Amino acid sequence: MAIISASRHSQSDQHQIWDHLKQAIATTSGFRRWQLERSPHDAQINNLSLDHQVKLYLRETLETLAY
């Protein structure tokens, strides 16, 4: 797998990459299941932007994998 140096990309490029990645993550069954599991217990999750939801999902997923 090729490693792309972040310094070689402009902030605009990085923002575009994040937007594409965020949209791809949001369409996964894991993310949708995570949303459904959270929404009955945490009504505020639905008020968060997709950006914040994806970041929270990734953080929780990585924390789970770290155990």
Image: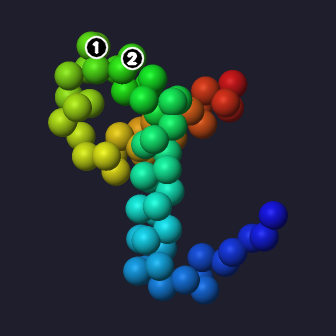
Amino acid residing under circle 2: Glu
When asked about the image quadrant of residue 39, the answer is: top left
Give the side of residue 39 with respect to residue 16, left or right. Answer: left
Residue found 51% across the figure and 30% down from its top: 29
Element assignment for label 1: loop
Q: Is residue 20 visible?
A: yes
**32 and 13: which is toward the camera:** 32
> What crowding class fits label 2: few (fewer than 14 Cα within 10 Å), some (14-19), or many (20 or more)?
few
Residue found 44% across the figure and 25% down from its top: 34
Quadrant in which the N terminus is drawn: bottom right
Residue found 25% across the figure and 46% down from its top: 49
Give the side of residue 3 with respect to residue 63, left or right. Answer: right
> What crowding class fits label 1: few (fewer than 14 Cα within 10 Å), some (14-19), or many (20 or more)?
few
Element assignment for label 2: helix
Q: Is residue 59 visible?
A: no
Report the mark closest to the observer, 2 or 1: 2
Give the Cα distance between marks 2 and 1: 8 Å
In the image, residue 12 sits, relative to residue 39, either above or below, namely: below
* Disc 2 to disc 1: CB gap under 8 Å: yes
**6 and 46: which is toward the camera:** 46
Residue 52: x percent and y percent? Answer: 33, 46
Residue 6: x percent and y percent? Answer: 60, 76
Residue 22: x percent and y percent? Answer: 44, 53
Residue found 26% across the figure and 30% down from its top: 45
Residue 41: mark:
1
Q: Which residue is mark 2?
A: 37
In the image, residue 57 sits, relative to residue 14, either above or below, namely: above
Quadrant in which the C terminus is drawn: top right
Query: Farthest top residue?
Result: 40
